Image (cartoon, coloured by chain):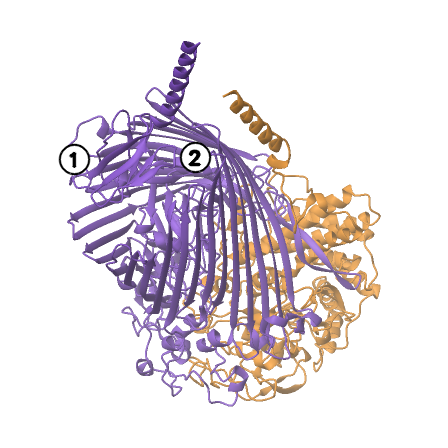
Amino acid sequence: MKKQLRMIFVFGLLFVFCVGHSAYAQLAKITGKVTDVTSGEGMPGVSILVKGTSRGAVTDLDGNYSIEAGPNEVLIITFIGFQPKEELVGTRLVINTSLAESIQALNEVVVVGYGTQERKEITSAVTSVKAESFNQGTVNDPRQLLQGKVAGLNIARPGGNPNGGFNMRLRGISSIGENASPLIVIDGVIGASLSTVDPNDIESMDVLKDGSAAAIYGTRGSSGVILVTTKAGKKGRTVVEFNSSVATENVARTINVMTAEEYKQIPGSRDLGGNTDWMDEVTKTGFSFINNLSLGGGNEGTSYRISINSRNVDGVGINSGFDQLNARLNLTQRALKDKAVFSVNISNTSIDRQFGNENSFRYAIISNPTLPVMDPMPQSPNFGGYSERDIFDWFNPVSIAEQNIADGRDSRLLASIRGEYNFSSKFRGAVFYASQRETDWRGSYSPKTAKFGGGFGRNGLATIQNNERLNDLFETTLNYDETAGKVGMAFLAGYSYQEFFNQGDYTQAGNFLTDAFTYNNIGAALDFANGLATVSSYANSNKLVAFFGRANFNLEDTYLLSVSARYEGSTRFGANNKWGLFPAISAGVNIANLLDMSGVSAMKFRVSYGRTGTQPGESYLSLLRFGRQGNFFYNGQFVPSYGPVSNANPDLAWETKDEYNIGLDFVILNNKLDGAIDYYTRVTTGMILPINVPVPPNLFPTTQLNIGEMSNSGLEVMLNYKAIQKSDFRWTTGINFSTLKTNLKSLSSGDLSFGEVNYRSNFGSPGQNLTQLIRIQENGPLGQIWGPVQVGISETGAPIMKVINGTAKDANGNPVYCNCNDDRTQLGTAYPTLNFGFNNTFNYKNWDLNFFFRGSFGHYLINSYRGFYENTESTTVQNWNIVNTKYFDPKITKAEYNSTHVEKADFVVLDNATLGYNFNVGPGRAIGRIRTFISVQNPLMFTGYTGVDPEVRYGDSESGNDPLAPGIERRATYFTTTITTLGLNLSF
Amino acid sequence: MKKIINVRYFVIGLVMSFFASSCIDLKEEVFSAVTAENFFKTDEEFISALGQAYTSLGGLGNHSGLWSINEIASDEITVSHKGGDWFDGGVLLQLHQHEFKSDNPFFQNSWNFLFGGINTCNRLIFSFEKLDNPNSPAFIAELRALRALYYYWAMDAFGNIPIVTDFADVEAPATKSRKEVYDFVLKELNEVIPLLKATKDGTTYGRMTKWSALMIRMKLYLNAEVYTGTPQWALAAADASEIINSGVYSLMPSYKANFAINNSQSTENIFVYPYDKVFAGGFNWVMMTLHIVSQATFNLTQQPWNGYQTVEEFYNSYVDPAKNPGTQGPVWKGLALTPSTGTIDGRLSNFLVGPQFRADGTTLIDPGVEPTDPTGRNGDPNGPPLTFMPYLNEISPGGLRQAGARIAKYEFERGGTNNMSNDFVIFRLSDVILSLAEARFRLGQTTEALALVNQIRARAGNLDPFTTLTAESLLAERGREMYVEMTRRQDLIRFKKYGDAWWPFAGMNRPKLVHSPGSFLELFPIPAPQLLANPKLKQNPGYN
């Protein structure tokens, strides 16, 4: 019995031992040192974490650490800027390890559609721009962060209007019928508005350039995709960041006009006694104050980041600017033993705008410099004391901007919630819901004394307008990762449902007793009683439904293959064509892994094909619709009448773009030089255009049809070179450039055609209406600037135009100039053949200096100012000032658009120069970082162009930004500005 | 693992249930537009549908359409190139100088106006035929008459055009000869005239009646020689007589009352398009013709465009006692700064001419005037005070801004907008009387013809009756009476004067305008965009 008891005791002891051992024996104290693989020195602050647990440690100043871990556990050793490393503990009690600097160009995380990949795995043309590479200075629009940074992505905002938008074109022009701006995806929300995100909150922007990368976005991928990722809180210490800057803005470029003294020399000029610099009168120095505060942090379960951004911007134009307040919360919560992850992002923006009036610039240019701003004449009270003259097409520009009120308020709400559940380490599913609410309110008032803006003629004129755009997105995705032998596989499948609803109203009414109400009491307008008020409202909706999937295969980071497809339907398509399939395939091979090349870290060759679409730009284009068409006099009274406003086209489908891309990504010269070279060719077919159709049998003279074919090709190169890498001096330089060639192969389909040759746009009033400026021609490039060639000046001062075809004959049968297309020719091209960006960053001790040049070459612009006002035509002499560029010829007395007004607009601009200083902050201080900087934007521009802004014009601002009529600088262009910013960055 | 699969099925099941419902439905939801499916439900919708056939006519009173091409191509109206203003690609000069080009957008606008109207009629006839509504037969007859009007205008302007009557026919139509179109319009009119209302009251105002249809037929017959080669003077006379003898219409005592702001009470107007500044905008002659500073004369809400002017010879046909005998009095002539003596034809109310004043009676100053030049060659003789001179110095490029008598036929409203409220007169009894006079004259019944012409002259005011009648004096009288009523081009062609070298103005670097009767220029070219859209259409001879 004793023996039995002893046995039991022994077994019990053994059991306890065993249990105790299993509880204890697995945890041993591991110590070690982490060193830098190149220098061999110990690295302080390296994070060591036992994989799958919360046990962690940090190395000390010499790089030493200690941690408890079991033999089967894995240590994850990470440090920012270095490649993470994993060490299996095994039997070791001392684990010394070394970290290698990560080659960002290979390992950086690139955001792609519905996921992320490492740079080395990417097989399509994707450019990722991280926050540290963004443009600096006063940046109020996220698009500006990317300006010039991505080869093939052109971002332009002609002039310096603080309320003006940036036009974006990726790889030139992919669609002539519909929206040609890239699709914006913010944190997974497709089609999100960029004004929901403050530039300070952006972590990275990833540009999906080729068709294969964009195909997962189906009918919205043709113009490329920009994925915006906002900053998120990180596990660990709470970080408080505060950025503040103050900026002044001054006019950089206008167009040269005559001073009062010069003007008076012109024979027949009318001296009105004053001496006014109108350009100066309509502008001022603008001030901006920008403040951003963010708090971020997190623990094992929760991480968060909250930011508040305020921007008070005052433009150079009178009464122009905006006040913007944006708040954002990004929250991530883990639950169910980390198997479930919930993310909530909420952003709210409110922008109070004052639009000013660009027409004040237009009329400042032609205002008689001898006219005083304020008129001492008795009739001046009629115009609020401003001098006004009863002449054609001129208004006191100061009055335009000072008297008219044009206000607005934009509200943006973007909220999204995402739930993800990891069924296993390989299989996970997610549900995503996002909602965006955008409202734009506009109010304007032209007082009784304002000659421009309708106030004078209408006895006070008020307008109020509301537009609301709502969209709701629901998506669900499943991901499955598997490894079979050496092949890593990743599968994605998903469903997407997105609903859009827009509505708005517009009221305009005049004839007020008093100006006191401005737009705030529109019901007081007498126009409602006499029937002259205008009221309208609208609503429309559309829906997109899609199924999508992708499979990625990776054989040891050497052979890579990606296949994807989106099957998408849109309500906007005709009944016979509701669904389209958008497939893509891309493959890459890393030659560096196959061949032994010295100094070459990576050399990846990739090819891709992808099909994307563009859906019709408006709803209901495929339907036969009737609209209000005036009133009908029926039995002694007017009753409303309805008539057709569109023809039915049940076959209306998406525009299709097929794109091939070959590319090379490389990291060579021992990681000093990295870059990417891409060549693409793309064909767009079935462009959605309004085509003239015979009436009858059709009801309406144009039908929206899918027609024609266009091809583009181009080369894009991006290079980054770490020229000097010393401990206290570093110089990094980068250049990117892109070329572009377009060809409009066809604008026809069967009997129907947009026209083998079309002429677009209109020079305008006075006297040059129906004067078309741009030719579109089958089998020709897009953007052909078109017009007559001036070869001399007649005795009367009219331009003598070249006889080109000589179809017109005079009485003697000799060819004479025909004012027709037979005697016009191509005068230039609207698109640049080369765009480039050139960046340099120097770091010397605590100083950093960055300057960034940007340029476009090969494009021309029609200088409208000169086409109308650079002549001594009698009206001009007596009433308008004269544009006085280097081309001014006093012999020319007639305004008639011709070749001399088309100018080469090549330019190089110093977009930004920033000098910063980082203060030394000792360890243990409350403040982690102090940086001050001074930044100058647009201080220097090199160009031969004499107009206001040589920037590329992608559409005609006077005809709804018509993409078929690029290359025209219109007369109401906002003057360009130079911004000087003084800023402070603090983090705690 | 099994559990996971179950969850997966659950998720997939959930997802599938979404798809089964509305989550893949792609039908468009329409909010603020009307589609064919949700229209034609009530009587009001029925009437508003009929209205569209008429509201299409609203394009008549606007710049750059059918009225513009007819008037600018005639000797009544020009739009000179005034310095930097009104060149507009030369399209207006081309029209006036008979250099018609198929890509001139005015032709395209006119075509769209005409065939848009035709098509609307076809569509509505098709709809009404299918609907069992008591109003249908009357509406259909009315629509056919209106369609005949559009076809008549289209045939008059473009000659050889397609004929489409069946809305359900979706084939692009081919060109028919002018003769075929003439026969078609005639047949339609013959069929519908007995079905149309013959009353003149509020219910037929602005609507097609028996009398408007008869008047279209009268005009077909009057121009039958031009349209078909065979004259039909007797038939024209018969239709004109039927209208006159019906007694439904009578001449107003005052000529200009027919064009007053409130002209709906006219006993003389047979068919009008009722414009209204609130309900039916689009009549903007006030903008087209007045000088920019005339805004202050009429307190207009907008600045006019200083475009359309009267050709000087045409204006002179009123004041010249040799051509137009009558009471002599002060009239404006040439570029004289003081009134001269001439015939004070009551119809000079058609023009705004002479010095202009602000609404308060003070002199109206034009600060944008050319230098003063008494010869009128290089500047206005009167300088800054705005004076509309009948004198036109040149058509291009240096047309004087104050030159030319302005179109004041329709009364301008004080404080008016760019939309005039006067009803646009399409058909009027005077035209019937003068047409009857012409038909009688052509048939050799000169005495009857002379009496009819003198009836018109007597009403005009301050005129002596004609003692004899010639083709020339008949055409001139038609001109004075029917100024800017869109008959002049047709009249000139019929009287074989369309190719004459009117307005031999200075500064034109081209031969004088001459083409002989029957020239291809008597038809406008088929607009280029139409040829592009419909390859079955043929361009008119002479144009390429």
Mark carried by residue A611: 2
Q: CA distance from mark 1 to mark 2?
A: 37 Å
Sequence order check, earlier mark of 1 and 2: 1
Tell which of A440 and B523 is nearer to you. Answer: A440
Tell which of B376 and A534 is nearer to you. Answer: A534
Tell which of A813 and B30 is nearer to you. Answer: B30
- Residue drawn at x 43%, y 85% is B372
Mark carried by residue A524: none
Q: Colour of chain A?
A: purple
Q: Chain of mark 1?
A: A
Residue A713 placement, left or right of A686: left
Q: Amino acid at mark 1?
A: Gly
Are the residues under badges 1 and 2 in a single subunit? yes
Q: Chain of mark 2?
A: A
The quarter of the displayed image where residue A712 is located: top left
Q: According to the image, label 1 marks what residue? A: A599
Residue B254 placement, left or right of A793: right
Q: Vertically, is B380 above or below A201?
A: below
At which x and y percent is residue B148? 70, 52
Q: Vertically, is A197 above or below A655?
A: below
Local packing at callout 1 (Cα closer than 10 Å; few below 14, some 14-19, many 20+) is few
At which x and y percent is residue A936? 29, 64
Give SS at disc 1. loop
Q: Vertically, is B180 above or below A261?
A: above
